[in-house]
Amino acid sequence: MLAWTADFALVLLFAWLIGGLTLHRVLAHVTDTVGLLQSSGWALLAGHGSALGRTEHLLGTMWQQIAILVVQAFALLVAGAFLYHWISLTLFRRTPGKFLAGLEIASCTRRAAAVRAAVSTSADIACFALACCLLVFGAFTAAFTVWLLSVIVFWYNVLPALTASGRSTADRLAGTTVIRRSRH
């Protein structure tokens, strides 16, 4: 539990950094759009068709562009979480969280590290990120369904680790085992 908490805290720190970058990008986009509106406000009101229709189109386009920035942030988060796990396991056979807890992954080949990283990232981050992306695009039912699936996938990965074997679904699929090792 300590290892997972420490690793997840580092991923959350990365998420916070990405969130700050994304907020900066969104604010820059909104500022650009407001400037465009100010410079072409008369054209918006005096143009052909209804001003309300043109305004709705402009705001809809702006929302789509902001939604793309948010999706890019979630994709970066998922890729970063995967790389964090995969690189740590490939180079050191443990993540910083596992190091703190005195744990190591046995039988950790590059392939096994990639499989374990993919399953862990999917269970911890990717399914939830997909639900958030669907929500941003207004697919509420799909977002709720994927969120529910993300909860199931998370527990499907975790619960086997609480049995006598101590192997999560990620361990079972990767063919690895978590073992105790000194921190030095």
Image: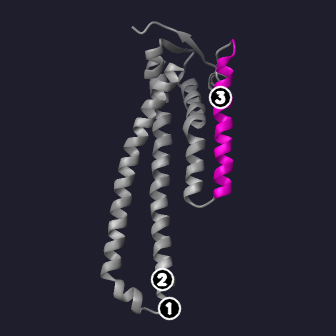
Q: Are marks 2 and 1 in contact (CB under 8 Å)?
A: yes
Say if the magenta span includes residue 160: yes
Q: Which residue is mark 3?
A: 157
In terms of sequence position, does the residue under pointer 2 or pointer 3 come before the other? 2
> In the rendered structure, are the residues bearing label 2 and label 3 in contact, judged by CB atoms less than 8 Å apart?
no
Which residue is identified by label 1?
49
Residue 173 in view in this figure: no
In screen coordinates, is 1 left or right of 149?
A: left
- In terms of secondary structure, where does tag 2 sit? helix
Q: Residues within 10 Å of mark 3 (few under 14, many from 20)?
A: many
Image coordinates of residue 128 in percent, x first then y, are 58, 43
Image coords of residue 107 (percent x, y): 57, 15
- Secondary-structure class at tag 3: helix
In the rendered image, the quadrant that contains the N terminus is top right
Per the rendered image, the range of residues in magenta is 140-164
Task: Please name the amino acid that badge 1 sits on.
Answer: Gly
Q: Residue at x 34, y 72 (%)?
A: 34
Dividing the picture into quarters, in which one does residue 14 lie? top left
Horizontal and vertical percent position of residue 35: 31, 74
